[in-house]
Image (spheres, rainbow, N blue to C red):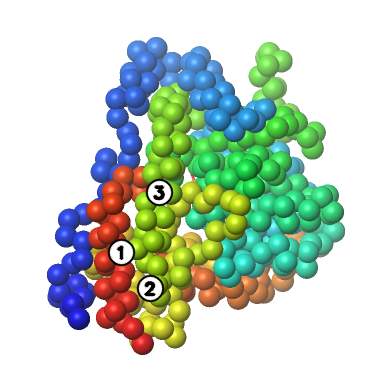
Amino acid sequence: MEKLAIDGGRKAIAGTLPTFRDASGRSLGAEEIGQLTEVIQSGSLSFLSGTKTAEFERRFAEVYGAKIAVAVSSGTAALHAAVTYLNPEPGDEILVSPITDMGSVIPILAQLAVPVFVDVDPLTQNMDPAKIEASITPRTKAILVTHIYGNPADMDAIMAIADRHDLFVIEDCAQAHLATYKGRLCGTIGHLGCFSFQQSKHMTTGDGGMVIANEDHRFGRELRQCPDKGWPRTKGGRDHLFLAPNYHMTELQAAVGIAQLAKLRKMVDARRRSAFQLTAHLEGSKARPVKILPDTTGTFFFYTFRLDSAEIRVSTADFVKALVAEGIDCFLGYPGKVPLYRYPVIQDAATFGTSGFPYTLPGVNDSAGRRQPVCPQAERACTETVCIWWNECFTEVHIEQIATAVRKVFAAYAA
Ligand SMILES: *Cc1c(COP(=O)(O)O)cnc(C)c1O
């Protein structure tokens, strides 16, 4: 048996793999530079005087067949615009998965609504539709669905529940650009779709985000005003109709976004192709890929597989340390070793001064929101899931190296 790199043996991956962290793993080039040069030469870095933000929104809406697209400064900003649009009463509840980025939850708390965590399906790690209805109360206003790892959640089941209970549905597509569910693009099935263009996402503007919808007003609010200080700019003059932040995307981000969007299909296809290659290489091994629902296309934000503690003779954490030592860019558990509700912002209600809002607001059931979220499947997933940072620039050779490294560690640590 080959000596593991962690024990001083030779690394399975000799060089370094392409990474989203630098030019080795990002498709940034002449197109982005050309777009950026136009913006700099125009002298307009703001959407108010420039043209790139409007163009990026138009093109993004076209790709998605959406009526409206609103560019914003991050994925969190996109989701915050969505929750601002929903205009919940303080203490209203929004259902959310415990396995997602904290950027899905911050906007709920920022609007004084209560995130109520619904456990995940152990196979897909997306919100489990079978567990949603038990969490619905008269205060539930919306379901915020993340398509985790780029794998579509079970939208038919979720939309049926939402219809039955008159709930608004926000899709968090920050990891799921161009993912499809039964032939429909994720982000167009619920009422609003939210995207991130942060450095690690399928396409990037450094930071950035987008909200798409087939409606532009509801709940007494215009969607476009939600990341724009509640300002109805089309009517001329200055007015502020409701409390809303400024989350404008700059023309510089939009310029890069236009160029990146033109490459998005190619970049996503490359991720999918190499992920399927790895799955084929790992056939028969003990790596159990996280399930992707039939009749959907996942877009592999991460390549994820599950470890069965009974099949390895080290801890899952040590197993992942060995993978990293072999040269794989991976980690254990998403968003981390524990689900979101275990982070201090929620556990300690570290929110608004010492108030503990929204958890301490009158009529709020703190148990449902914070004290006793019982999501055993999410807890397990966080300690058993290997997340490999996936990349559009992986070649067949890279995939063979990754597969060799995974097999090597399984062989060394077999129970
Ligand atoms: C990245 C991400 C966000 C937040 O996006 P930012 O651009 O980092 O603010 C939200 N949800 C999910 C699922 C994400 O992956």
Instruction: Decide: is 60 above or below 111.
Output: above
Residue carrying label 3: 273
Give the residue pinned by disc 2: 285
Q: Which mark is residue 403?
A: 1
- Residue in the foreground of this view, choosing between 363 and 12: 12
Distance from Cα at disc 1 to Cα at disc 2: 10 Å
How far across and down, in percent of the image, does residue 204 sit? 41, 38
Q: Residues within 10 Å of mark 1 (few under 14, many from 20)?
A: many
Cα distance in 3D space between marks 3 and 2: 20 Å
Relative side of 183 to 220, left or right: left
> Badge 2: how crowded within 10 Å, few (<14), some, or many (20+)?
few
Q: Which amino acid lies under the numbered mark 1 shown in the image of this protein?
A: Ala
Q: Earlier in the sequence, mark 1 or mark 2?
A: 2
> Is 399 in front, or is 191?
399
Q: Secondary structure at mark 3?
A: helix
Compared to residue 1, the image places residue 54 above or below, namely above
Viewer can see residue 90: no
Chain-order first, disc 1 or disc 3: 3
Picture quadrant where residue 22 is located: top left
Numbered disc 1: secondary structure: helix
Name the quarter where the C terminus is drawn.
bottom left
Residue 143 x, y percent position in the rendering: 71, 53
| Residue at 42% over, 58% down | 303
Residue 315 vertical placement versus 169 (above, below): below
- Local secondary structure at mark 2: loop
Using the numbered discs, state the Cα–Cα distance from disc 1 to disc 3 in whole angstroms.
15 Å
Q: Amino acid at mark 3?
A: Arg
- The disc, 3 or 2, on the residue closer to the chain's N-terminal end is 3
